[in-house]
Image (cartoon, grey):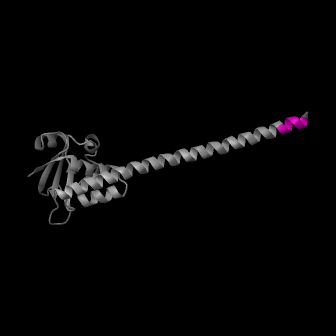
């Protein structure tokens, strides 16, 4: 009798060990799948941003030296007529983007698909007064928000100043 109990106990431990191994394998596969999906999402955004950049270049609106600045809601309403506004500035003679640089365009992005995500970036220093080239480089470095800004630039109404 005692040998049967010992055999049953060993069998139980083997089944438990097998279940733990299966659980670890499933967990690993699940987390890998999540990373693959996330990489697929950023690759899609990068592709859309590349297309948007090309379309802006064709319209002669893309300049690596242009700086962009997401406007506050109240300032945007005053200058653009919409709560969704971006200013495009010409980089100053010092070679750096500055708030006092000359504004070349105001953009109304109220009809852009990422308008709320872009509006939420107002005040975020990572996206304040960056050149379009810096923005593009951030997008290529897997920054989803930078890609969304580029896509939004293409979907915006550009108002010359």
- Residue 130 visible in the current orientation: no
Q: Position of residue 63 (x, y in %)?
A: 19, 61
- Residue 139 visible in the current orientation: yes
Seen from this angle, which residue lies furthest top?
1
Q: Position of residue 149 (x, y in %)?
A: 27, 50
* Figure quadrant of residue 67: bottom left
Helix, strand or loop for the magenta stretch, by majority: helix
| Front-most of residues 10 and 77 | 10
Q: Residue at x 21, y 40 (%)?
A: 111
In this rendering, position of residue 148 left or right of residue 25? left
Task: Point out the stretch of residues depicted in magenta.
Answer: 2-7
Q: Residue at x 14, y 56 (%)?
A: 100
In this rendering, position of residue 24 left or right of residue 43? right
* Figure quadrant of residue 22: top right
Seen from this angle, which residue lies furthest left?
161
Q: Is residue 93 magenta?
A: no
Q: Residue at x 12, y 54 (%)?
A: 103
Q: Residue at x 33, y 53 (%)?
A: 47
Q: Position of residue 146 (x, y in %)?
A: 30, 52
Q: How many callouts does the rendering have? A: 0
Name the quarter where the N terminus is drawn.
top right
| Front-most of residues 29 and 84 | 29
Seen from this angle, which residue lies furthest bottom?
94
């Amino acid at each position: 009798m005692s040998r049967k109990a010992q055999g049953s106990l060993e069998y139980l431990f083997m089944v438990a060990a097998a279940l733990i191994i299966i659980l670890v394998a499933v967990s690993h596969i699940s987390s890998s799948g999540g990373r693959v999906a996330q990489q697929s999402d950023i690759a899609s955004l990068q592709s859309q941003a590349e297309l948007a950049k090309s379309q802006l270049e064709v319209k002669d609106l893309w300049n690596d030296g242009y700086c962009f600045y997401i406007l506050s809601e109240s300032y945007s309403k005053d200058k653009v007529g919409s709560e969704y506004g971006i200013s495009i500035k010409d980089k100053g003679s010092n070679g750096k983007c500055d708030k006092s640089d000359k504004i070349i365009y105001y953009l109304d992005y109220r009809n852009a698909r990422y308008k709320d995500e872009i509006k939420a970036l107002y005040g975020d220093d990572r996206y304040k007064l960056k050149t379009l080239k810096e923005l593009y480089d951030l997008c290529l470095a897997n920054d989803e928000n930078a890609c969304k800004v580029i896509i939004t630039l293409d979907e915006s109404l550009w108002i010359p100043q």
